[in-house]
Amino acid sequence: MLTRLRWLRKQLDIILDEVAKKTGISIGWLNQIERGIVADVKNPQKKKRLEEYIQQLEQRVQKQIQQERKTHDHPPEPET
């Protein structure tokens, strides 16, 4: 789950600073998590906040994909 963080952020144009503020984990540590240098967050509270935040991002990306599909499947009617 932690390795998906960078992909999710890029999909939603979220910077590490925002993730750090939401999770209480430093930007440097988040950067190491994204690059696979650090495999886990030892602090249980911070780990839980990060996992919950990643789940929220996944839900937002899913909604975005669904919206794009709806728009693609049913383009708006041209104005007359």
Image: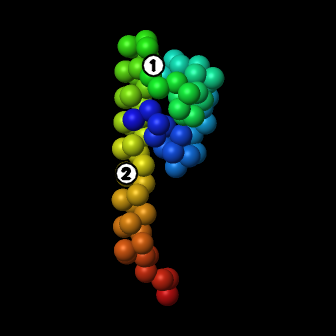
Looking at the rendered structure, which numbered label has been put on residue 62? 2
Q: In the displayed structure, would residue 70 be above or below residue 19?
A: below
3 lies left or right of 31? left
The mark nearer the N terminus, 2 or 1, is: 1
Q: How far from the left and from the top, in percent, is residue 57? A: 43, 40
Q: Please report the residue visible at 53 percent of the width from the left and 32 percent of the height from the top.
A: 36
52 lies left or right of 29? left
Residue situated furthest bottom in the rendering: 80
For the residue pair 62 and 27, the one nearer the viewer reads as 27
Q: How far from the left and from the top, in percent, is residue 31? A: 60, 29
Q: In the displayed structure, would residue 63 be above or below residue 75?
A: above
Q: Please report the residue visible at 43 percent of the width from the left and 63 percent of the height from the top.
A: 68
Element at label 1: loop
Which label sits in the foreground, 2 or 1?
Answer: 1
Q: Please report the residue visible at 63 percent of the width from the left and 23 percent of the height from the top.
A: 28
Q: Please report the residue visible at 48 percent of the width from the left and 43 percent of the height from the top.
A: 8
Residue 58 seen anywhere in this rendered image of the structure? yes
Q: Residues within 10 Å of mark 1 (few under 14, many from 20)?
A: some
Q: How far from the left and from the top, in percent, is residue 48? A: 37, 21
Q: In the displayed structure, would residue 24 be above or below residue 36?
A: above
**Kind of residue indicated by mark 2:** Gln
Figure quadrant of residue 65:
bottom left
Looking at the rendered structure, which numbered label has been put on residue 41? 1
Element at label 2: helix
